[in-house]
Amino acid sequence: MATDNTATTAFGEVSRVRGIVFEYLSFGASVFGIFALAVLLIYVTIDAFDLANANPLWLLTYFITLVVPFLGFCLYSARDPAVTRRALVAAGGGLVAIAAVFTAIEAFVGQIPRLNWPLAYLFVVIIPLTGYLTYVGAQGRAGSVGFGLIGRLLGGTAIGLAFTVLFLVFDARLWFLVYTLGVVPAVLAYGYGRIRSVPTAQTAAVPVAIGGLFVAVFLRPVVDTYPTTVFIYLWTLAVPVAVAGGFVVNARGSRTAALAAAGGPLAVATGVGLLGQPLGLGVGGPNALLVVAVAGVPTAVYLHRVADVGEGVTGLGLPVLLVAGALAGALLVESFGLPAPDPWLNGSFVTEAPSRNAREAGLYPAIVGSVIIIAMVAALSFVLGVATSVFLEEYTADSGIVGALTRMVQINIANLAAIPSVVYGLLGLAVFANLIGFGFGTAVTASLTLSLLILPITIISAQEAIRSVPDDLRRGSDAMGATRWQTTKNVVLPEAFPGILTGTILALGRAIGETAPLIMIGAATTVFSAPTSLFSRFSAMPMQIYAWADFPQAEFRYGVVAAGVITLLIILIGMNGTAILLRNRAEGEN
Amino acid sequence: MTDSIESPDLQRRSGLTRLKEGTYGGFFAACAVVTLLTTIAIIATLLSDAVVFFSEVPIRQFLTSTNWSPNPAGGGQAFGIIPLVIGTLTVTITAAFIALPVGTLTAIYLSEYATPNARSILKPLLEVLAGIPTVVYGYFALVYVTPALKAMLFPEMSTFNALSASLMVGIMTIPMVSSISEDAMSAVPDDLRQAGYGLGATKFEVSTGIVVPASISGIASSYILAVSRAIGETMIVVVAMGAQARMPPVQEAVFGIPFVNPADVLIDSGMTITVAMVQIAGSDLTGGTLPYDAMFALGLTLFVVTLVMNVLSDIIAERYREEY
């Protein structure tokens, strides 16, 4: 083959042109899709934050007060002169290159719509550079401490907000009864059995919990005096979170530190809860208590650990640095009277209901709907997915009924994964909505449908995680006389857990963006108030985006929908980022 | 092991333990059965309503009629799948024109040319393409791609059109082709490559003359899966392609040979099978009406087509796989 085109050349000489062209062609192909998506994302971001109308001086102000200190922090954390040099060259050279290319294009080709060179510089150089430096900085001590702190603050706040959203639908008073009568006695029984080595007490925990649950469900319609919501949240969520945090610190260090780590955030949360609405963002007193407690306790535990280890303590200044930068930027913009852009994606967008008026339109009911659905899908698909994959990997047999069942399920899963999502929508419509009678477009119908939709993905990834557990561990457990369930529970599942969790979160990312099945089961495109029960009509973020994309007005097309798309993508990135972090951490441990 | 009484009882377990073991095993098996039940439920629901539909509208009419207007308010009801098939084929073929070559080249680059560093960056980025919600792609097609195409290439393009929807479907399916093809290419043993180099082949010749033919079964099955994904794609086309079931205008070329100008189909709105289902779902969900049943007939068509393609891809991957 090598000789067909260059028969006359001397031995050992072959034209390299074809090979080089092909290499660059294939490289171009691999970045084609990524490049196209990047351009579209740049435009949607510009629209969502109204950056096309941003004053270059406004951009410059925030660049200097917010971005430069952050990049400096990352470089400080990396402590690598080579990285610093590279970053400076990229930032400086990028500025010159972008300005030159942009001027050339505008002079010879024509105006590029809604993009000027400061924005192009921001998107093409600064954002990738920030991403790179964040990655490099996170490897250093100070950086990992700082990002860990921010991660706990943001993640805790997000989980706390998700809890408050769930209490919009689920009955907080029922939860109070279940918690008081079922969960607390069961945990006490288990703990007592564990400490005093009484196996019967440990075994009794499960029946106690189930009994408490039944009693609670029975008592709920009978009892009609309940403590205030603040007290319920404090007793059923904030206190256990704080106690858990206290135990973690106690196991690591002193008793006083444990008391401080548990009591400090709890006290702040109680104060916030009793005072009312200091948090803004539409988060009322009891809800603020929940958010502060769920975000505060892990943060306090983390702070204690960092102080204990004593490395990279300077990283704790990162949140302060960012907040101070944002405040300084705002102050400068205010004092110089710089015209600020009017972003579509702002605080009121995520806290207001949809509206005919573009400026007043918000995504709040759809966000609540999505959170509720995803919470239920997570619970359902996790249990079903893990149980099925355990069956397929651990309880499998080559022959007999079990063997036949395993083979059938295995083939079936591959086929289920390929069925279009609209068809799952038809299943939900016919079975859950019509046949069982959960109703059209209710949250229950939607979550059941979406759970079945992502079940194949969950199972396949969980199977991979379980398969990657070394067989030696299983054999070791078997040799000590453990039963199959004991091996699974004590050896296989703990080892495979990070992998299973990663796969499940990635699958949930798919579920949160699904629209077609929701349309098929009759979910509302627009609802004006958040759902109040599992059987009320709801909307979800992608449904609302679908509805708005149909509006012909430019404010909706290029403003409100862009803001919705960015909100959805931010939530997706948050979920997938968490999944990847979990995976990396699990890989780092092994 | 004999059954004699002296032999040690290695399975010595109390009844409670055995009961616990059996309960857990049964629970796991029950969960596994849920996936089987899902398939059975899908087939049963699709069939039961489709049978009602086909007793009203003969299958033959459904498959050969060229008019689709399920809405009884607009006068005559007609259920002919041909215009929907044309719409679906338009999107699928156009998307395939993008996804298949780009995906294959990407797979070749990742498996043959890319450094480990470049791979570790490119692969997650490509996965992002598949992870973006499809309604977002549809919005991009409608709001950014269509105006750009209109300004640059096709001034007479309509707001809802097949081309920009197909472009987005193509981009979305690139990672599907590239990841499966790349797995197949990476599975080609290095001995074959080294043998090629030993015969004096260049890297290009090794890639296209050895690696691609050796992994052709994997590449083909990735093509089929990607096409089947494009057929079932819903939200991109719903948002960006409009909802008008139409037959393409037939023109006459020299010697009276009829032909359809692809540009006419591409720059105009159209309707795929999935769009037709969504449209009915948006108007009528009470059940028992003819359009409601038609939705299930369309779903059955979609289900059968994607299932056949999936099985086909499995067979190709199994039967023509080179064993090394």
Image (spheres, rainbow, N blue to C red):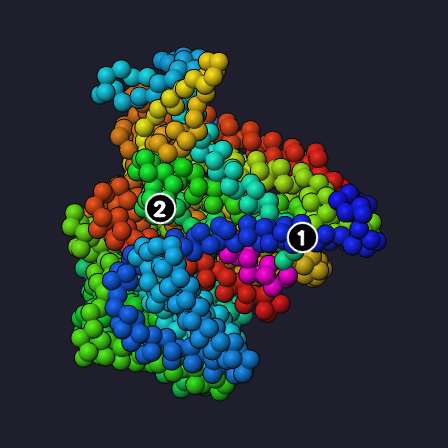
What label sits on residue A400 in the rendered view?
Answer: none
Residue B120 magenta-highlighted: yes
Q: Amino acid at mark 2?
A: Ala
A17 or B39, nearer to the observer: A17
Residue drawn at x 29%, y 40% as measured from the top left: A523
Q: Are marks 2 and 1 in contact (CB under 8 Å)?
A: no
- Span of residues in magenta: B115-126
Q: Residue at x 55, y 52 (%)?
A: A28
Query: Is residue B69 among what the camera can see?
Result: yes
Task: Count up the numbered dots.
Answer: 2
State the residue position of label 1.
A17
Instruction: Please say if B218 is above or below A130.
Output: above
Vertical placement of residue A59 versus B84, above or below: below
The residue where tag 2 is placed is B148
Using the numbered discs, state the Cα–Cα distance from disc 2 to disc 1 in whole angstroms.
34 Å
Question: Mark 2, mark 1: which one is toward the viewer?
Answer: 1
**Would you call the spot at circle 1 few (<14 residues within 10 Å), some (14-19), or many (20 or more)?**
few
Front-most of residues B240 and A401: B240
Mark yes or no: residue B139 visible.
Answer: no
The rendered magenta stretch, by its main secondary structure, is classed as helix
Residue B86, quarter of picture: top left
Chain under callout 1: A
Q: Secondary structure at mark 1?
A: helix
Residue drawn where x is 53% and y is 48% of the image: B175
Chain for numbered disc 2 = B
Query: Which residue does the image show at 39% across and 23% down from the upper left?
Result: B248
